[in-house]
Image (cartoon, grey):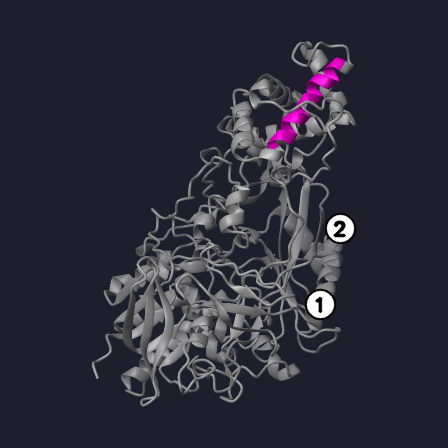
């Protein structure tokens, strides 16, 4: 009916839905064993999401239910082959940790974890894992109820002022329309 | 022969059908309104209204499997979300056919109210520059009306609808009956200054939008209230603040006691009596039960939306009308148009970092047509307008910045710097070969032949699109925007969601289907007042014009009925 586009994967749709640019999928480096269950990575997902959006003076990713949201997406949003690919990607966290002398990612201390993530964000090793976790975390956090404490939530404004002072509003809006 | 069951049958309950229902009912006519889609109860059926993102499993996203199965075309629409999808017709249940090598994105509703529940509420009058265009450049046939004929009806419908807008005195965009205009935000005001200084014949104004900013007694009495600036209109609005059939015209019709509204009721064809030369009624199919029933009336108004109406007319063949109802001219189904868009520009606007907005304005800026107004001095005829907004994006955009952790989280508390973008809506010329027919073999689930669409953008449109990108860029730069990028993106006809034509009005029965009163030349008790009637497309959003034509046509029809002429 309409001109066909290239097939978009669900992972791509997550990126697009967060308003983020489509990223190339780098092949997972190192570990080539079978992906395994999500539950093997439950703690890493929780740990990394909280490192990306930590508790500050407002809730962080864990309190916002982001780890559960990500696991739910893996179960109900991702196609099976995409799910397996993502879980395989998650192995990069341990791979990178070991490359830096740690037993695994979770065993590293907080400062070391941050350094590991900074390296992964730069890439190339671990960049796929980091980028995907960041996108999922951002999406899960900023659409959660906890985020109403973090950003301005104004469900029924009742009026409009196109020249308000930013100081009057305070923080960026959580909701921008439909 | 038995008396007709009704004075009038109105096919469709959307933008124009709602008006036909109201006008007939208020004039004392027993009116049957037939809607193919499901019922819509204001409030209870606004299932997406007031949902927070976390109330939805996928936080406003629709699962790809669901999109692929049920809404592959509808999901192309900018307004398609989890919270709005209940108003979009399922493509899986409403198939249509497209000519090989062409495309058409048919975006539509499937409920009482139709697209009047889903529209962007943009409301702009046509002028004689538009009504006179076909005569002037020879494309299509002359409109049988001019602005003077429709002006009183624009006044009439706008008063009831409630349109917020500013009087600007522009000859190409006549002022309407307005409630207080929404305002340009402070960056838009800056851009306007630079743009209008550099281009004195161009204007940037606030959009004219069918939102209540100062409800009248009549609107309050219908249960409508002021806009709350949520900009979530397509979910359904319990405030009745933007115009829809469900909020306004249907309740008005209901109150007279003269309207019977049947939902889930498709019209298969008109029943024609060759002896009297009139349509006597309609054949219907209940979509839930499959039951067939016929209803009779003195007068029939087709308001089923452009392609819906054309499907009924093309399917209403008889000995007299072998190629479609009232199709002696051979033009039924031809001269299909839409507004082409996805050509424009966007950029950044420096400064004003201490400024933000309160509320979510459900409206943008509008740049009325400035090309070829009096003379054609471009390499294309006709013209285009632009819609757009200046805004500061939130986390969806700012979260793409590098970083993570507490500092990153903190940084997302600041909205992005200002950006501004405009997208053009371009006029599409009426062309004989842009047409719809009925597919010879494919049918829909009720057994009605599918509409088959064969349209393409042609030379005038393609040249216009290049100019749209060019002028968009120069205006943004003149307005003070930086890093301006213009674009002409691939687009599909139908994505303007202003598809029209196919049963055009005209002076000559040999080259048109309808006369100056939207009445079929050949069958005087059948009228078409939705987009199918349009003889040219102009570039202005067309809904208010459909409403005005409908109210005017009902007024004429009722006069004729009272004088026993139809």
In the figure, B555 relative to B360: above or below? below
Give percent across and percent down for residue B3: 21, 80
Q: Quadrant of residue B552?
A: bottom left
What is the number of callouts on the image?
2
Give percent across and percent down for residue A3: 64, 58
Q: Nearer the viewer, residue A82 or A168?
A: A82
**Is B231 placed left or right of A88 in the picture?**
left
Q: Main secondary structure of the magenta part?
A: helix
Q: Which mark is residue B462?
A: 1
**Is B549 placed left or right of B379 in the picture?**
left
The answer to if A97 sits in the magenta stretch is yes
In the figure, B400 relative to B338: above or below? above
Please report whichever mark, 1 or 2, sits nearer to the chain's N-terminal start: 1
Residue B413 in sight in this render: no
Q: Which residue is mark 2?
A: B484
Q: Which mark is residue B446?
A: none
- Label 2 chain ID: B
């Amino acid at each position: 009916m309409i001109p066909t586009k290239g097939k978009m994967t669900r992972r791509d749709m997550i990126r697009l839905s967060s308003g983020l640019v489509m990223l190339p999928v780098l092949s997972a480096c190192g570990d080539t064993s079978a992906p395994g269950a999500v539950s093997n990575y439950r703690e890493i997902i929780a740990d990394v999401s909280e490192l990306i959006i930590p508790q500050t003076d407002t809730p962080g990713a864990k309190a916002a239910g982001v780890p559960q949201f990500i696991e739910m997406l893996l179960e109900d949003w991702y196609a099976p082959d995409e799910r397996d690919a993502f879980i395989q990607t998650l192995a990069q966290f341990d791979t990178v940790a070991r490359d830096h002398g740690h037993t695994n990612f979770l065993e590293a201390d907080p400062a070391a974890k941050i350094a590991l993530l900074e390296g992964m964000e730069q890439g190339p090793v671990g960049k796929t894992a980091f980028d995907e976790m960041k996108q999922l975390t951002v999406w899960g956090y900023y659409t959660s109820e906890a985020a109403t404490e973090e950003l301005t939530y104004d469900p029924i404004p009742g009026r409009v002022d196109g020249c308000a002072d930013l100081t009057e509003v305070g923080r960026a809006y959580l909701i921008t329309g439909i | 022969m038995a008396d007709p069951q009704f004075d009038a049958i109105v096919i469709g309950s959307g933008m124009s059908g709602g008006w036909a229902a109201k006008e007939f009912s208020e004039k004392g006519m027993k009116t049957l309104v037939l809607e193919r889609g499901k019922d819509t109860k204001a409030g209870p059926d606004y299932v997406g209204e007031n949902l927070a993102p976390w109330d939805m499993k996928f936080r406003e996203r629709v699962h790809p499997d669901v999109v692929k199965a049920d809404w592959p075309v509808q999901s192309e629409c900018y307004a398609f979300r989890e919270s709005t999808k209940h108003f979009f017709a399922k493509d899986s249940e409403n198939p249509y056919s497209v000519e090989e090598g062409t495309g058409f994105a048919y975006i539509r509703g499937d409920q009482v109210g139709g697209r009047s529940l889903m529209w962007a509420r943009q409301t702009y009058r046509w002028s004689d520059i538009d009504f006179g265009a076909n005569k002037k450049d020879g494309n299509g046939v002359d409109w049988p009306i001019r602005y003077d004929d429709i002006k009183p009806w624009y006044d009439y419908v706008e008063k009831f609808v409630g349109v917020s807008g500013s009087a600007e005195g522009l000859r190409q965009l006549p002022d309407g009956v307005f409630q207080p205009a929404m305002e340009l935000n402070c960056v838009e005001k800056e851009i306007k200054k630079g743009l209008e200084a550099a281009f004195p014949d161009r204007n940037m104004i606030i959009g004219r939008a069918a939102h209540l900013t100062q409800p009248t007694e009549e609107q309050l009495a219908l249960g409508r209230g002021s806009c709350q600036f949520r900009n979530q209109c397509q979910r359904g609005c319990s405030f009745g603040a933007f115009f829809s059939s469900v909020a306004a015209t249907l309740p008005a019709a209901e109150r007279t006691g003269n309207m019977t509204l049947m939902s889930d009721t498709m019209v298969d064809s008109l029943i024609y009596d060759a002896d009297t030369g009139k349509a006597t009624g309609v054949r219907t199919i209940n979509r839930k039960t499959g039951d067939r029933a016929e209803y009779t009336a003195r007068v029939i108004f087709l308001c089923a939306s452009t392609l819906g109406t054309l499907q009924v007319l093309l399917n209403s063949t008889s000995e007299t009308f072998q190629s479609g109802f009232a199709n002696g001219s051979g033009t039924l189904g031809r001269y299909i148009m839409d507004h082409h868009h996805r050509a424009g520009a966007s950029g950044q606007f420096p400064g004003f970092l201490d400024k933000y907005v309160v509320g979510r304005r459900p409206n943008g800026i509008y740049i009325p047509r400035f090309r070829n107004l009096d003379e054609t001095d471009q390499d294309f005829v006709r013209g285009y307008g632009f819609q757009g907004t200046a805004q500061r994006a939130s986390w969806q955009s700012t979260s793409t910045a590098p970083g993570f952790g507490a500092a990153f989280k903190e940084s997302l508390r600041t909205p992005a710097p200002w950006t501004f973008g405009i997208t053009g809506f371009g006029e599409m010329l009426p062309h004989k070969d842009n047409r719809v027919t009925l597919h010879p073999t494919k049918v829909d689930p009720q057994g009605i032949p599918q509409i088959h669409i064969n349209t393409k953008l042609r030379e005038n449109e393609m040249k216009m699109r290049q100019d749209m990108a060019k002028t968009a860029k120069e205006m943004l730069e003149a307005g003070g925007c930086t890093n301006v990028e213009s674009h002409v993106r691939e687009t599909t006809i139908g994505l303007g969601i202003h598809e029209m034509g196919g049963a055009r009005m005209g002076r000559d029965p040999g080259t048109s289907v309808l006369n100056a009163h939207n009445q079929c030349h050949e069958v005087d008790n059948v009228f078409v007042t939705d987009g199918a009637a349009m003889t040219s497309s102009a570039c202005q959003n067309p809904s208010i014009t459909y409403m005005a034509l409908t109210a005017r046509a009902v007024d004429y029809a009722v006069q004729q009925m009272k004088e026993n002429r139809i």
